[in-house]
Amino acid sequence: MEPRYPLPPFTQETAAQKVQAAENAWNTKDPEKVCMAYTADTEWRNRDEFLNGREEVKLFLQRKWAKEHEYRLKKELWAYTDNRIAVRFEYEWHDDSGQWYRSYGNENWEFDAQGYMAKRFASINDVAISESERKFR
């Protein structure tokens, strides 16, 4: 596979680029595109789900975005080291009934030498909001 730039070891600038690239990709809501940022044997924890491999990630993202309508995400670099990045994020979405939510969380990422994410551990909380409370439009 081709390297996925920027590569570790990260600097402040390259870690921020990696975070922005992830935000941009997730906001496409395209599971095929998003899952290609991860290693074939990636390990995830997302809330109470444990996923292994790119195919499980793709199926997870298909379920996620079928449920979370008008999804809009913002990520912020929290910290970084050689091949790891910590991110703070929030996103908004609504369910089939029209109830809006803002989801808050933190992610810990670990990358391989080719710049693919090998591990992603996410802790996320949802808060019901009214449509007038939305930040992201």
Image (cartoon, helix red, strand yellow):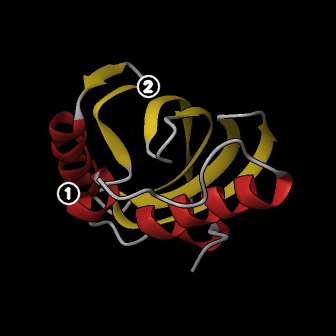
Above or below for 130 versus 11: below
- Quadrant for the C terminus in the image: bottom right
Q: Of residues 122 and 95, which is closer to you in this image?
A: 122
Tell me which corner region of the image, top left, top right, bottom left or bottom right, holds residue 6.
bottom right
| Residue 47 numbered mark, or none | 2
> Is residue 54 found left or right of 107 in the rendered image?
left
Residue at the location (51% across, 70% down)?
Answer: 24
> Is residue 67 found left or right of 21 in the rendered image?
left
Q: How many labels, in total?
A: 2
> Is residue 24 found left or right of 94 in the rendered image?
right
**Residue topped by disc 1:** 66
Q: Of residues 132 and 48, which is closer to you in this image?
A: 48
Tell me which corner region of the image, top left, top right, bottom left or bottom right, holds residue 105.
top right
Q: Return the x and y of residue 83 as percentages of the image width and height.
A: 65, 34
Q: Of residues 128 and 107, which is closer to you in this image?
A: 107
Residue at the location (49% across, 35% down)?
Answer: 112
Q: Return the x and y of residue 125 as percentages of the image width and height.
A: 56, 33
Residue at the location (70% across, 44% down)?
Answer: 88
Q: Return the x and y of residue 28 as percentages of the image width and height.
A: 37, 72
Above or below for 77 versus 84: below
Would you call the spot at circle 2 few (<14 residues within 10 Å), some (14-19), or many (20 or more)?
A: few
Q: What amino acid type is highlighted by mark number 2?
A: Arg
